[in-house]
Structures are given as C-alpha cells and as structure tokens.
C-alpha cells in the first residue's frame, strides 16, 4: 500500500524535475509532446523507482533518451553542426523549439550538477548522448564508446 504512494510521489517528483530541467513552463509543450510520443516513459520511470534512483536522475535519463530520439528522427543531418555550435558555443540563433528546449535543458543540467542534484555519471551520460547524436554518431557506437571509457577508467 505504501509502495503505491511512494511510487506515485516518485512519478510526480520526476515529472516536476523534467519540467524544471526544461525551464518550468517555458518548454512544457516539449514535455507534453515527449509523453504523447513515448507513452512507455512511465514504465522507465517506474523502473528507476524500483532501482532506487533519485527523481532528478530519472528525469535526466528519460529526457536524454527522448531528446536524443527527437534529434535523430526530426533534425536533418545537415543541421547537426549548426545546432551543436548553438548549444555549445552560443553561435547563431535557434531555429526550432527543440533547440531552445535543449539549450535550457543544458543550462539547468549544469546548475543541478553544481548543486549535486544530478550525479556526475548522469550529467556526463546526458551531454555525451545528445552531443554524440548531433555529431552523427549512432546509438550503438555511443554505447560502445561509453563502455570502453568505463573499462579504461577501471583499469587506471
């Protein structure tokens, strides 16, 4: 019985964290579109609850996956370089709502990392996934590179 209430609270906290990361209302249409497009997100959030993750880490994981998919599916490959320059170096103007949302997300992610609201692992995972997608690196290759980096860190 109490588990149900804890899980419900976790879901609400995760959703609130996602809204925060996207700029509290500024980009809630992106958040609503993500939930409409990817209805299985609640299953992922429930799995994060079962694994004992924090709502903020769960929010970062879900947003990373969803934003990466959105980049891969909806952004033309010819825009990747321009979008990456905008996100990382503030060069140019955003052309889409998605770009503005990701820029806000990156800023909020840095704040949460500095405040220890997000683990270093989730911060690095999120940034490298999204930038990797913008560099045209496939999902499997990004996962392989993360695995090799982790192995190298263990060996050192």
Image: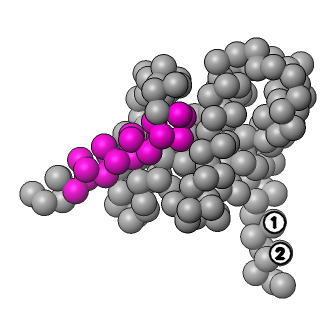
How many marks overall?
2
Give the residues in magenta: 6-23
At horizontal 78% and vertical 56% (from top left) the residue drawn is: 144
In the rendered image, residue 59, in percent from the top left (x then y), is placed at 48, 46
Residue 140 image point, x, y percent: 75, 46
Q: Quadrant of the C terminus?
A: bottom right
Task: Choose between 147 and 123: the one closer to the eye.
Answer: 123
43 horizontally vs 123: left or right:
left
- Does the magenta segment cover residue 139? no
Residue farthest to the top, as pictured: 95
Q: Nearer the viewer, residue 24 or 95?
A: 24
Q: Where does label 2 land, which residue? A: 152
Q: Is residue 18 left or right of residue 3?
A: right
Residue 10 is a magenta residue? yes
Do callouts 1 and 2 mark residues in contact (Cβ within 8 Å)?
yes
Residue 5 percent coordinates (x, y): 17, 53
- Residue for point 81% across, 19% down: 93
In the rendered image, residue 8, in percent from the top left (x then y), is placed at 23, 47
Point out which mark residue 148 bears: 1
Quadrant placement of the N terminus: bottom left
């Amino acid at each position: 019985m109490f588990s149900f209430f804890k899980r419900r609270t976790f879901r609400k906290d995760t959703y609130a964290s996602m809204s925060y990361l996207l700029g509290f209302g500024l980009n809630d249409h992106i958040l609503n579109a993500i939930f409409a497009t990817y209805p299985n997100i609640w299953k992922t959030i429930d799995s994060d609850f079962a694994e004992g993750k924090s709502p903020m880490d769960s929010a970062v994981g879900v947003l990373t996956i969803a934003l990466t998919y959105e980049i891969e599916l909806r952004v033309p490959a010819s825009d990747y370089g321009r979008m990456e320059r905008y996100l990382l170096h503030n060069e140019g103007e955003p052309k889409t709502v998605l770009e503005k949302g990701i820029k806000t997300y990156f800023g909020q992610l840095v704040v949460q990392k500095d405040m220890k609201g997000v683990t270093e692992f989730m911060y690095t995972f999120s940034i490298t996934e999204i930038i990797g997608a913008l560099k045209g690196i496939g999902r499997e290759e990004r996962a392989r590179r993360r695995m090799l980096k982790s192995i190298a860190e263990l060996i050192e």
